[in-house]
Image: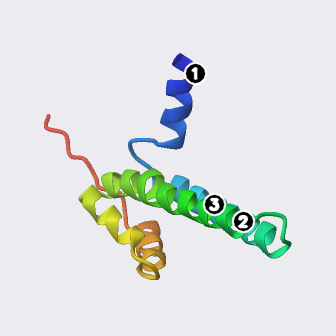
Amino acid sequence: MIMLAFVAGEIFPSKLTRKQYGLRAIALFVFFMVGVWLWVAALVSAQVFISWVVLGWIYAAIGLAVPRLRNAGLSPWFALLVLVPQLNLIVLFVLLIVRERQVTRPD
């Protein structure tokens, strides 16, 4: 059970830095391209391909955008914009360049 919690914490972290977000975005792009290749090569059906894309899209919204928005000090509700077709690419790119929020601690 502890191992499952560790894996879940790694897949869906509470915050992501720009570097972590960028690396995960590249991995998600590779995930999509593998799905496209499998579909074009007729190794998977259209239903499997659509499921593949939907899983990636949900992960982009929940697993990437929400932690990155928290780290940038923005509302996690902006992650819903990732679910809008074609706007999602713009949102994912903007999240890559937005700086982290600097936390000031009282002395």
Q: Which residue is mark 1?
A: 3
Q: Which residue is mark 3?
A: 52
In this rendering, position of residue 85 left or right of residue 106: right
Distance in Å between CA atoms under marks 1 and 2: 28 Å
Name the residue at 78% across, 63% down: 44
Q: Which residue is mark 2?
A: 35
Nearer-N-terminus badge (3/2)? 2
Mark 1 and mark 3 residues within 8 Å of each other at the beta carbon:
no
In this rendering, position of residue 61 left or right of residue 46: left
Quadrant the C terminus occupies: top left
Q: Secondary structure at mark 2?
A: helix
Name the residue at 20% across, 46% down: 104
Nearer-N-terminus badge (1/2)? 1
Rate crowding at label 2 as few (under 14), some (14 to 19) or many (20 or more) other CA atoms within 10 Å: many
Check disc 3 and give the amino acid type. Answer: Trp
Q: Secondary structure at mark 3?
A: helix
Residue 88 position within the rendered picture, expressed as x and y whole percent measured from the top left = 44, 74
**Residue found at the very far bottom of the displayed protein:** 86
Check disc 2 and give the amino acid type. Answer: Gly
Q: Secondary structure at mark 1?
A: helix
Mark 3 and mark 2 residues within 8 Å of each other at the beta carbon:
yes
Name the residue at 77% across, 70% down: 39
Question: Which of the labelled discs sits on residue 88, or is there none?
Answer: none
Nearer-the-camera pick, 106 or 42: 42
Distance in Å between CA atoms under marks 1 and 3: 25 Å
Residue 50 position within the rendered picture, expressed as x and y whole percent measured from the top left = 61, 66
